[in-house]
Image (cartoon, rainbow, N blue to C red):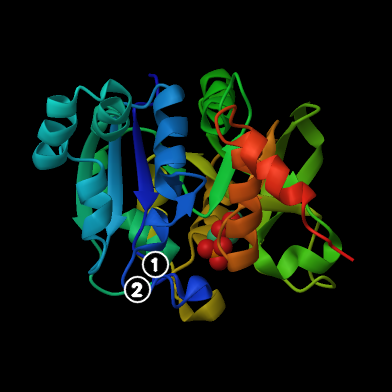
Amino acid sequence: MPIKKVVIPAAGLGTRVLPATKVVPKEMLPVADKPAIQYVVEEAAASGITDITFITSRNKRAVEDHFDDQPELRAALAAKGDEGKLSKITEPSTLARFNYVRQQEPLGLGHAVLMARSVIGNEAFGVLLGDDLIVHPPRPGLGQLIDVHQRTGASVIAVMRVPREDTARYGVVTVDADEQLDARTFRVRDTVEKPSPDEAPSDLAIIGRYIFTPRIFDLLEKVEPGAGGEIQLTDAIRELSRQEPLYAYEFEGMRYDIGDPVGLLTTSIAFALEREDLSPQVKAYLRTLDLE
Ligand code: G1P
């Protein structure tokens, strides 16, 4: 069955980007001229997803509003005949059908995904994390995982090779060298959340794109608080890898981490440089900088 539903956790406090996120949800911070979360929703839509469930929390109303109609603004732009801006504000609400589930307490990523259980039901689904932007035209990051799921019927997680000294920022996988499907697709034997470099079982880090069979919900129900005292998705994934086939897929494309101020800034510049309408002026500005 094709994957049609995804969960996008958007309930985090965004403390790495304070004070910008004191009032504004981190998902709404701009990358070039779009809220970061819109790129993630566009990736899902381009991967064939029709139903998106956001896990939100207090202070995340702006996310709901962004993917809704804005009648006053729409009327004002229509009256001016400004078709370009009109399509910019109407497009987000057309990308998918949206559901919202509130997480009342920040109990962890695993807990957030579990909150979507009743909306997803008993079918395979995707998860996209908003801190990770993946760019790979023409096949989007999530779409690549969906292709592996179609081949195998199994759960699939995106991985990327990272420098050893960075493993404590990620979930890290142990793969089975004898059960590799192809150069990019590995059978997972174990996972660990945020291991120190000397404890990390490999340099293959989990990046925020996942396809799960609904079994993950049963496992999330049982997971005890792990790293950071939170209900970790990675701990349920470890159990999943013991109960059914699970693949790690080394995706093609560029990944941008916008979870901290430097990542947010550099991603904004990189995305602006890819835009025909923005890049000449941004390049002209960058050339004026004396960086020594
Ligand atoms: C989350 C996951 C982690 C994964 C990372 C990717 O961590 O728990 O396994 O490697 O996203 O960005 P977070 O960055 O939310 O701490």
Is label 1 in a helix, a strand or a loop?
A: loop
Residue 3 spot, x, y in % from top left: 39, 26
Tell me if 48 is positioned left or right of 271 in this view: left
Q: Name the residue under label 2.
A: 106
Q: Position of residue 241 (x, y in %)?
A: 59, 48
219 left or right of 279? left
| Above or below, comparing residue 246 to residue 199 in the picture | above
For residue 166, which numbered disc appears in the image? none
111, 35: nearer the viewer: 35
In the image, the residue with mark 1 has its CB under 8 Å from the nearest atom of ligand 1: yes
Question: Could you tell me if residue 118 is visible in this image?
Answer: no
Q: Residue 12 carries which label?
A: 1
Disc 2 residue type?
Pro
Residue 29 can be seen, yes or no: yes
Quadrant location, ligand no. 1? bottom right
* Mark 1 and mark 2 residues within 8 Å of each other at the beta carbon: yes
Residue found at x 71% / y 42%? 284
Q: In which quarter of the image is residue 52?
A: top left
> On the rendered structure, is 176 left or right of 94?
right
Task: Check disc 1 and give the amino acid type.
Answer: Gly
- Classify residue 94 by image quadrant: top left
**Dot 2 lies on which element?**
loop
